Image: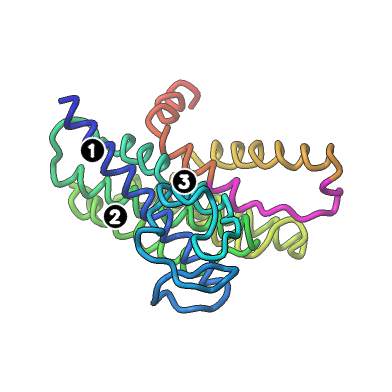
Amino acid sequence: MFWLVFFKFSVVFVLGLIFGSFAGVLIERGEKGESLRGRSHCDHCKKKIVWYDNIPVVSFLLLRGRCRYCGQRISWWHPLTELIFGVTFVGLAWQSGFFAGWLSGDDIWRTVFCLAIGFILLTILFWDWKYMIIPDGLVVGGLVIGVLFYLRAYLLSPDTLLAVNTDLSRNLLGGLAVGGFFYLLWRFSRGKWIGGGDVKLGFLVGFLVGWKLSYFLLLLSYLLGAVPALYLLLIGKAKAGSKIPFGPFLVLATLIVLCWSDRLSHLLKYWF
């Protein structure tokens, strides 16, 4: 059993590293309007990177963080992104039950869903943090995956078409609650308090966690966002009117809520 869990852990972690590397390429090329086709190249000397210099994390360490050809430093952004993807993939796979013995078809389907959503959310996190942009394509992709997952569960359940207390309906209410809240902030502030991309992202993450956990999601996202904001104000790196991307904290809060959804739902039984 230990070796089976270790094998699963290794597969998921390496898969996270690979998708983290792909997300880095997607962000950089997407922001520059470049095609995803073709090999990556050094940002300084523009020489194409051979495959053995493009292995996630490992190549960075072997090259000691420098380009093989021009010797210029490679940003820590790349291995850090890959490692965060790897760790997050392990956490999401654990939440989906992937490490619990032999898997059924539903377990595999749930794990694929969690990892796909994790990839989209983390890509949004890093894209917004670096460029303060939340691509509509990623939000729409996340919604399509989420709707298909919960629609399948709804169709396989004994619920009738008129049933209202289903996972799908609870998720739709969560999306309307969080997205509607952000829309009101955006509307009343005329875009000064929050951006239009955050409204769309709010609907996506609200849909993913459902209306029962939407309060925890909002509370945690604002708490997470307050910490770096206060730190930047204290050290003089930011002023009262400075813009700090909110999307990364909303995504981080969503991932935490998704990974701890069972325990949070258990707590709600005592509170409500």
Q: Which residues are magenta?
A: 237-251
Between 41 and 77, the residue placed more toward the observer is 41
- Residue 82 in picture, x, y percent from top left: 45, 49
Specify whether residue 238 is painted magenta: yes
Instruction: Work out whether mark 1 precedes mark 2 in sequence or the reverse, and give the earlier one.
Output: 1
Which residue is found at the position 38% from the left and 49% from the top?
17
Q: Which residue is mark 2?
A: 149
Earlier-in-chain disc, 3 versus 1: 1
Give the labeled residue for mark 1.
8
Inspect the image, locate mark 3, and give the three-letter code of the amino acid beneath it: Leu
Mark 3 Cα within 10 Å, few/some/many (few <14, many 20+)? few
Question: Which type of secondary structure does the marked residue at label 2 adopt?
Answer: helix
Say whether residue 270 is left or right of residue 235: left
In the rendered structure, find residue 61 and report the number of the disc placed on it. 3
Specify which label sits upstream in the sequence, 3 or 2. Answer: 3
Q: Position of residue 225 (x, y in %)?
A: 67, 42
Q: Is 135 left or right of 161, judged from the image as shown?
A: right
Q: Quadrant of residue 37?
A: bottom left
Q: Nearer the viewer, mark 3 or mark 2?
A: 3
**Residue situated in front as seen by the camera: 72 or 256:** 72
Q: CA distance from mark 3 to mark 2?
A: 38 Å
**Quick one: 228 or 257, which is closer to the camera?**
228
Main secondary structure of the magenta stretch: loop
Q: Position of residue 246 (x, y in %)?
A: 65, 51
User: SS class of the residue under badge 3?
Assistant: helix
- Say if residue 3 shows up in the picture: yes
Does residue 189 sit above or below 105 in this rendering? below
Q: Looking at the picture, which amino acid does disc 1 mark?
A: Lys
* Residue 76 in the image, given as x and y percentages of width and height: 57, 50
